[in-house]
Image (cartoon, grey):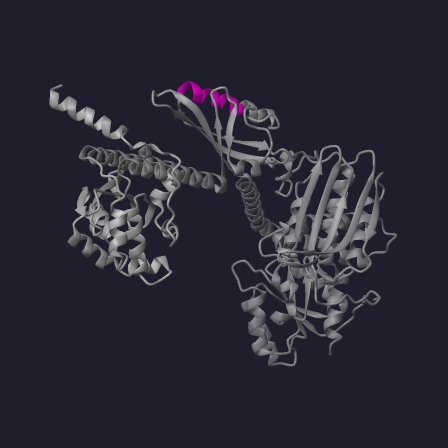
Amino acid sequence: MNTNSRTDQLNKIKWLSDNHADLLDANKSPYIPTYGDITELNTCRLIMDSVGKDLLAEIAEDTIDLLDTSVAIYEANGDYAFGMFSSGWCQYLDLASRQLCKTNDNQKALVCGKWLCHENCWNDSAKVAIESGCSTDIKCVGGICLYCEPIYSAGRVIGAINIGYGNPPNDYEQLKQVAKKFEVDMEELVKIGGTYQSRPQYIIDLAKKRLKAWARLIGDTVEKEEAKRKLKEAQKRNQALLDHSPVCHKIVDLDFNLKYMSANGFKMLKLDYNAEVYGKPYPFEFFPETFQKAMTEKLKHVKKTGEIVVLEAPAKDIEGNEVWLESSLIPIFDDDGRIDYITVVSANITQRKKHEKEKKRFEEQLRQSQKMEAIGTLAGGIAHDFNNMLGIITGNISYVLSRLNKDDELYEVLTDIQESSKQAQGLTNQLLTFSKGGAPVKKVADINKIIRDAAIFSIRGAASKCIFNLSEDLWPVEVDEGQINQVVNNLVINANQAMPNGGAIAICTENVTIESESGIPLPSGRYVKIVIEDQGIGIPEKHLLNIFEPYFTTKQKGSGLGLTTTYSIIKKHEGYITVYSEIEKGTVFNIYLPTSLNDFKEPKDQKEAKHKGQGKILVMDDQEPILKMVGRMLKSMGYKTAFSADGSQAIKMYKKAQTTEDAFDAVILDLTVPGGMGGLKTIIELLKIDSNVKAIASSGYSNDPIMSNYEDYGFCGIVPKPYTKSQLAEILNNIFAEK
């Protein structure tokens, strides 16, 4: 070091030690302007909030200690983050220029243009530094100098730090100009200026260097705080996403202990949010053993292979309710490529599983309906032909029996044949019940009486007994009495057979209202519910979906048509039947029948009608044996007969007879004539010839819609095949009684 440099350093030390101890006086009272704290108007607050008032004060005080002037720290928009006045000169002129604003409102004062110190420090110094990104060094309007450093944070200018430096002017003219601008007393200005202790240049240079360092510190602090704030906001957003996510997020360490679980996980498993689950093994101990085993195996696989795997399995919540979880197990790697932990993302798919189960149930029902339609189509054709044959047998037997004495040895033989024919007719009726297009012949009936009579008849001679609990105020229902009788008969017989040693069969009826959300596939409304319950051996679960299928039976001598027929009858009554069963506990069948708007009327007692007539009747049927049989019946009643094989021939015969005195008094028309005109087309043409024609419909297909609503088609009556002489006589008696 040369002599001049050594001397310069000694002079600096001497200046610092000579009468300048107040530079380091930490006990100085801070100056507070009378107009208040203008940092309260700060709307940007980036620097002010990020750095904090205390650190900004330390920065300002450090600079003031060197220069004893003023410091202002600005936000990018010009708002004050901090301000400090130390020298009497700066304090005096700042207050004087503030008073020039003629307002107590600091906000208005800042924009009025008369606050000279503010205007000069901001517009001429700090604003220029912010906009240019470079430091500024200018002459101050108050006679000293202003130096300003821009504050950078993350590559952008976010504000500026401005200091005043230098000696107040001592030139008279210059002082006079300052006094005039600030409208202050000249002598007072000279007096205040004389109190300032001059700083050597190296102190000023040191202050500027330190100002650069403080600007960097402020910028770095803001950058760190912004990063912290953004991280906190991101964490808050992520937490909100996790808390409101429809799935459950879990973090599991490599020892398979739970480290985190999102809010939905607590909700999904009905756990208290304060439950001590962190640090505990996962899967939870209240999960089913099968789930624990499967999940643990998956976790081990992920840990070993680093692969993402999926597990779909039923778990349980803390209350024991089943919860189906679809879980994705995802390994999370550290910077070195090693697995750090495993995330388990679980979706609650319980509802989806319920819907899948429900869908499967409906698909089974559809498949069952399709099977029943297929067998029904076949059954209709078979039953029609079979009833034609039975009609010949039954009709002829009834004719012969009517002419035999009961003591005749053949009478009992024919009676046995007739009884067997009735049993055969019952079988065909079962086939017809679920045949395609069949419709029950419905009327408002006493459903309780039908149920009681059918049940008692079905249980006669059995070890079981029926216990009835039938509601006395049932809503009216429209049913086919014979078909509902058949339903009860089938179910009671099954119930009895399910209890080989006998038991109680509970039968009850009640009114119910079905809502849309009940789960029963029926329109909302009022229904009568029939319950038939046994205490038998029960039905295996694997068979429950098949019991209504045609020919499905577990009985050695069962036909497999009983429950199929039952299902079809209830369906055609626009009702629904359900079954519930437990092994060794019993089976319950629930039947729902829609109510009717019509009231039930007690039937009047009727004596068996007997018929004896005269006249001529035309019989149309494609079966010659039937024509002969009906001819014999009618002849025995006193009628002449004529026969036709199809409808077209019958029309010609009827039309021709109308022109003579030998017109037909009635016609009996077979509805189905293979290869020819059937009864429906025939009656249409006959009505054109004779609007008063008395026509009787006959068919082996008793579930034909015409047989249910014959009057709508122009017929006066019906006689389903097979029929007896007495049944035919009753029909004739009815139609001729209308004369």
Q: Residue at x 23, y 49 (%)?
A: 127
Residue 273's quadrant in the figure?
top right
Using the rendered view, name the quadrant where residue 164 is placed.
top left
Tell me where residue 219 appears, x and y as whole percent.
29, 37
Instruction: Identify the magenta region.
Output: 294-305
Q: Answer left or right for 545 relative to 611.
A: left
At which x and y percent is residue 715?
A: 64, 70
Residue 32 shows in the view: yes
Q: Above or below — where is 736 with respect to 411?
A: below
The magenta stretch spans residue 708: no
Task: List x then y, in percent, for residue 49.
Answer: 38, 42
Quarter of the figure with the N terminus? top left
Picture mark count: 0
Whether residue 295 appears in magenta in the rendering, the answer is: yes
Q: What main secondary structure does the magenta stretch of the protein show?
A: helix
In the image, residue 393 sits, relative to residue 311, either above or below, namely below
415 vs 74, nearest the viewer: 74
Residue 413 visible, this orientation = no
In-front residue for pair 333/43: 43
Q: Horizontally, is 532 left or right of 540 in the view? A: right
Residue sitting nearer the eye, 88 or 515: 88
Residue shown at the point (37%, 49%) measured from the top left: 39
Across and down, in percent, residue 542 comes to 62, 34
